[in-house]
Amino acid sequence: MSQITYQFEYESRLRCAFIGAGGHSYRNVYPSFQYAPIDLVAVCDQQADRAATYARMFGGGNSYDDHHKMLEQERPDAVFIVTSYDEDGRVQATDLALDCLAAGVHVWMEKPTAASVAEIRQLQAAAESNDRVVMTGLKKIFTPAMTKAKSITESEEFGGITSITVRYPQSLPDQEAKQDPRRLIGFLDHIYHPGAVLTYLGGKATRFSYEQDPVAGGSVSTLRFESGAIGSLHLAGGAASTSPLERVEVVGRGANLVIEDGVRLTYYRPGAKLGYGRSGSYIVDDDVAPLIWQPEHSLGQLYNKNLFYLGYVAEILHFCEAVQNGTAPVKGTLDQSLSIMHLFDAYRRTSPGQTVDLPLPD
Ligand SMILES: NC(=O)c1ccc[n+]([C@@H]2O[C@H](COP(=O)([O-])OP(=O)(O)OC[C@H]3O[C@@H](n4cnc5c(N)ncnc54)[C@H](O)[C@@H]3O)[C@@H](O)[C@H]2O)c1
């Protein structure tokens, strides 16, 4: 990711088609193609005029209002799917991904991958039987800050992860509303972000409980991971919309790191000695002092463009590399989506104060 290649500089590019010409894809996904080995050959949206407009704007060749027709006529290597929800709360992209796999096409899809554990398993089976890649754009685990944080937690000096806390603003519907998939759309839509971070850093969660505030729907959960580490997820429903959304803290042994607002990473390195009662200065030796990374916002650089610091370009490059090299992606995998769905399921099927082992039985 340190040296970016512009799209037109790639010697070989994937023939890609796109399903969905909506708001998010306009802002963040099509523009990321400028930095990926992608030849956009077709755009499909049920709104034919939108598909034609996006095809023209993003160099997408032909436009369609029916994805079956597009798959048949274009025979792309891969399809990007950025669609929305059906009225009953189903994730439109899930069935579209199954159709693409059946047509022998690799799939990159926006989160949420699906609305249930069973649907993720269906996608896993279809990906395997058709020998195709399915990747979800879990952007939070592709940000430069998170990528660096992950490598710090894997370093010997960090001492292994002992605990993790993640804060993200999101309300959880009450017990009655949770039974209605339509009223869970907002929660499903957003749990993928902190859920991806917890899964990426902590691995599989094996125990879960939460408390919920009855006014704003905020919640705090405690988690235990297979590794033995513990974690908490503070879903700060009720937070101001002007507030930074996120804070992630990972603690090792005598070392910890914090990511504020998705971009500012501080690593409190191990080894500093500040004897209690006699230390007149908090300045420690340079080789054990905290390290801070944050972007400057003055230069016309790629790193201070949201397509990069929010992880969009990186998640697309990861997919393209997997398809071009014939390897499986290691981030945005269906296994990671499955872990997130297990967490979603636990919020959906348990009551505040209840402690359960994860995953819940089907
Ligand atoms: N990762 C992120 O940062 C982020 C941010 C916002 C949204 N999203 C995700 O992006 C997705 C889209 O969100 P949005 O706000 O752009 O939605 P949107 O409603 O603006 O766009 C969806 C588009 O898909 C089209 N569509 C639906 N079914 C179709 C089908 N069968 N064939 C062809 N076209 C079809 C619709 O006509 C619409 O134009 C959601 O899954 C959302 O969770 C992700």
Image: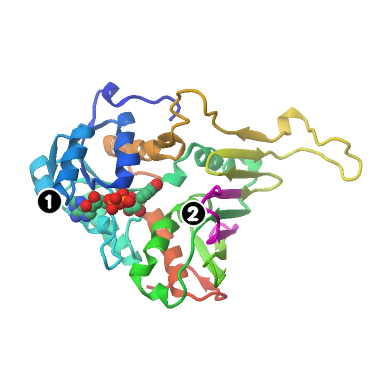
Please say whether residue 359 is one of the residues in the magenta stretch: no
Judge: label 1 CB < 8 Å from ligand 1.
Answer: yes
Residue tagged 2 = 194
User: At numbered mark 2, what does the secondary structure look like: helix, strand or loop?
Assistant: helix
Residue 299 percent location from the top left of the image? 49, 23
Under mark 2, the amino acid is Pro
The residue that disc 1 covers is 66
> Closest to the observer: 1 or 187?
187
- The image position of residue 21, as x and y in percent, is 24, 45
Q: Is residue 101 left or right of residue 322?
A: left
Tell me the tag on residue 170: none
Q: Amino acid at mark 1?
A: Asp
| 286 or 70: nearer the viewer | 70
Could you say which quadrant of the image residue 354 lies in? bottom right
Badge 1: how crowded within 10 Å, few (<14), some, or many (20+)?
Answer: some
Image position, residue 116 (x, y; %): 34, 65
Element assignment for label 1: loop
Q: Compared with residue 218, is residue 168 higher up or lower down, i.e. above or below?
A: above
Quarter residue 191 falls in: bottom left
- The magenta segment: 225-249
